[in-house]
Amino acid sequence: MSDKIENIQRIIEYWVNSSEQNHQTMNNLFKSKDYN
């Protein structure tokens, strides 16, 4: 059971990290559009 819980925590951490990166990427895209 504990192994499954650890895996779920890793998946959640990965998802949070990737979503943060996507958010930053979107912000960068909007900024680049503003500069253009």
Image (spheres, grey):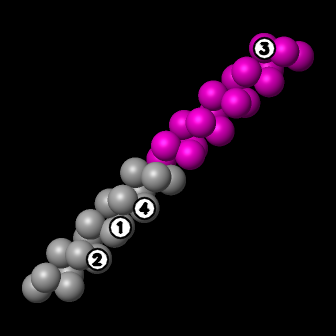
Crowd band around label 4 with a 10 angstrom C-alpha radius: few (<14), some (14–19), many (20+): few
Q: Position of residue 29 (x, y in %)?
A: 72, 30
Q: Which mark is residue 14?
A: 4
Q: Who comes first in sequence, dot 2 or dot 4?
A: 2
**Taking 5 as reference, is 25 above or below it?**
above
Question: Are the two marked residues, 4 and 1, in contact with CB atoms closer than 8 angstroms?
Answer: yes
Residue 32 picture quarter: top right
Gap in Å between the C-alphas at discs 2 and 1? Answer: 6 Å
Considering the numbered disc 2 on the image, is that residue within a helix, a strand or a loop?
helix
**Residue picked out by circle 3:** 34
Q: Amino acid at mark 2?
A: Asn
Point out the image quarter for the N terminus: bottom left
Q: Which mark lies nearer to you, 4 or 3? A: 4
Q: Amino acid at mark 4?
A: Tyr
Q: Position of residue 22 (x, y in %)?
A: 57, 44
Considering the numbered disc 1 on the image, is that residue within a helix, a strand or a loop?
helix
Crowd band around label 3 with a 10 angstrom C-alpha radius: few (<14), some (14–19), many (20+): few
